[in-house]
Amino acid sequence: MDMIELARQIGREIQQDETYIKMRLAEQTSEADEELQELITNFNIKRMTINSEASKVDKDEEKIQELNKEMRHLYAQVMQNENMVNYNKAKKEFDEKLQRVLAIIQNSADGDDPETTDFIGGMGCSGRCSSCGGCG
């Protein structure tokens, strides 16, 4: 099996991984949440309104501040939505696993031992503690 086929196999394994499935289900639930989608739409409209006002030659700073306040409030509502919370948690978990896989591949391509290299605490770990600045 060549490297390209191995990469395709990794892709298939990623899509069967529990963290990937959990993230996709949380994404679908978020997309089906009409209240959340309305909040996101309103947030995006508010952001576009701010950009439009800020680009005016005679912009109204007071209006921009009020719009920013409203946008922050909408953002807080979006981020507090249970489905968004669940999605963000699932995405973080999946992203951490994916970063670990990518670090192992990258570190191996840099000459590290594929059996011991890893991604720990946000740092690529070569498995050689003598060259380490610490594990976070």
Image (tube, rainbow, N blue to C red):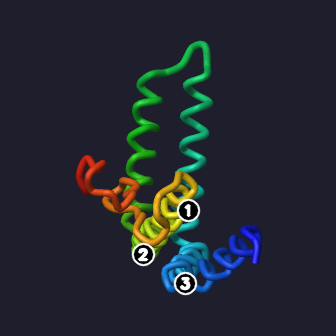
Left or right of residue 41: residue 118: left
CA gap, disc 3 to disc 2?
Answer: 17 Å
Disc number for residue 17: 3
The front one of 23 and 56 is 23
Calculate the distance from the C-alpha at mark 3 to the C-alpha at mark 1: 18 Å
Residue at 60 percent across and 13 percent down: it is: 57
Q: Position of residue 20 (x, y in %)?
A: 55, 78
Spot occupied by residue 93 in the image (x, y as percentages of width and height): 42, 71
Q: Residue at x 33, y 57 (%)?
A: 128
Of residues 125 and 92, the one nearer the viewer is 125
Q: Residues within 10 Å of mark 1 (few under 14, many from 20)?
A: some
- Side (left or right) of 133 relative to 97: left
At label 3, the amino acid type is Asp
Q: Nearer the viewer, mark 1 or mark 2?
A: 1
Place residue 70 in its image quadrant: top left
Going by the numbered disc 1, the residue's amino acid type is Ile
- At 40% from the left and 75% from the top, the residue drawn is 82
Q: Quadrant of the N terminus?
A: bottom right
- The quadrant the C terminus occupies is bottom left
Q: Residue 7, relative to residue 129: is it above or below?
A: below
Label disc, if present, on residue 120 of the rendered structure: none
Q: Position of residue 85 (x, y in %)?
A: 40, 70
Find disc 2 in the rendering and name its residue. 86
Residue closest to the eye, 20 or 27 = 20
Residue neighbourhood size for the residue with mark 3, other residues' Cα within 10 Å, grouped as few (<14), some (14–19), many (≥20): few
Residue visible at 49% across and 64% down in the picture: 104
Q: Which residue is mark 1?
A: 105
Q: Amino acid at mark 2?
A: Asn
